[in-house]
Image: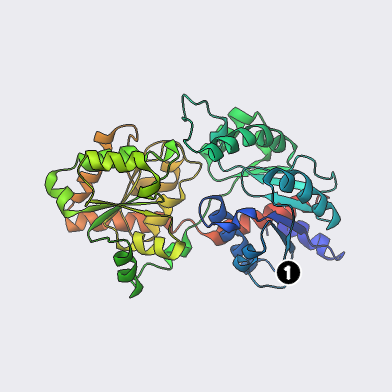
Amino acid sequence: MVKSDILFLKNYKRGFSVKVGIDGRYLKRQVGLGKFTYHLIHALAKIDSRNEYIIYLDLPQAAEKLPQVKNFHWKVLTPSNYFIWEQICLPLQAAKDGLDLLHSPANTAPLCLSKKIKLIITVHDVMFLLPFSVLPKSPSVYQNIGRFYRKIIVTAAARKAGIVATDSHYSAKDIIRYLKINKNKIKVVYLGSDQMAEQLQSRPSDNETLEKYKIHKPYLLALGGTDPRKNTEKVIQSFQKLNREERQKYQLVIVGIDRHRNSNFSELVKDFQLEDRIVFTGFVGESELATLYRQAYLFIYSSLYEGFGLPVLEAMSTGKPVVASKTTSIPEVGGRAVLYVNPESADEIACGIQKILNDSPDAYQNRVDLGLQQAAQFSWEKTALAYRSLYEAIGARI
């Protein structure tokens, strides 16, 4: 029996269970922070019937994404202005609801929380603290404002928090280095990807998705973004460096970017005369993303900085070989299953891709098997169990 279970049983005898509040604003979109929040909440609902949860939202539509179980409740707080919602409305409502603790799962948290309420903040990474020489500015004003906001808020919130959770040991080291907080209150909790593993087999709807985006098999899959750290330009350059025969045989499918809204990438593709070989899908939902993973020949992830690298795990769990950056947390997630490259070098990325394309059927299958074995070590259930232990340990100290 783990320590948190012993603490819980002692408190249960006196009619005590932990009343947990979770900031659920990012449920609006199931990417990045929203995906983490969604799967954490749903996994908690499956494994925890003994504690009470209140999910705080800024839009009522997000409630549709919540589990329908008796110990999970939700409240919409207004106004929806980001700063006012987080720094004023949320702490006031948390106090009114008599929370034992508040979990802020998305790299930021309220600073003026009642002393009676413990705070757990999940800091997925500290890229908002990195100098622009290491991680360049984003072309998005919104992203740059968010980076500045987190630099101020997270530094203070992490020092006030009872526990700072993070996704990897790499991120834990970065948090100690940049936030200057006691390493004893940092807890590493890995993420999961079993929702993708459950969708390993092809489905009739797969062809509809491929036709929708004019994708022809075989194709290489990459996740892109306008954020410079996603390194989308290098992925396009690496595809251009493949042998002409390979470029004619394979398409490159980039998820997360709309070609019509990102002229820089469109111009690059046009300069390389690859308009008919590179597909930009824009944002896709989780079901379509699972299809694109499932039907791809391999997955490319050349990100410059990641606190975990969930797409690497998702690709492995759907049986795809992965070419990924040998930087930050990614080797911690990919283990021996990934072919690692220098993300700063389009030549090296291209060589990594070409190596897998040249694999014999047996060598290719070996990469698939290694990836499935590595991905099986991670699950959202394990993530939820770890967070429940943190909730009960910190809640029991109140």
Residue at 45 percent across and 43 percent down: it is 332
Image vertical order of residue 159 relative to residue 323, above or below: above
Q: Left or right: 366 with respect to 394?
A: left
Residue at 51 percent across and 41 percent down: it is 307
Outermost residue, bottom direction? 204
Outermost residue, right direction? 14
Q: Quadrant of residue 73?
A: bottom right
174 vs 301, nearest the viewer: 301
Instruction: Name the spot of residue 125 as percent of width and height, x first.
Output: 55, 39
Residue at 69 percent across and 37 percent down: it is 158
The amino acid type, in three-letter code, at marker 1 is Asn
Image vertical order of residue 78 relative to residue 45, above or below: above
Instruction: Name the spot of residue 148 as percent of width and height, x first.
Output: 61, 32
Image vertical order of residue 25 relative to residue 168, above or below: below
Q: Quadrant of residue 228?
A: top left
Q: Quadrant of the N terminus?
A: bottom right
Outermost residue, left direction? 245
Q: Give the total number of marks visible in the rendering.
A: 1
277 vs 380, nearest the viewer: 277
Label 1 packing within 10 angstroms: few (<14), some (14-19), many (20+) = some
Q: Left or right: 39 with respect to 203?
A: right
Q: Name the residue that disc number 1 marks.
A: 71
Instruction: Name the spot of residue 341 as percent of width and height, x first.
Output: 31, 38
Instruction: Name the spot of residue 221 as percent of width and height, x first.
Output: 32, 53
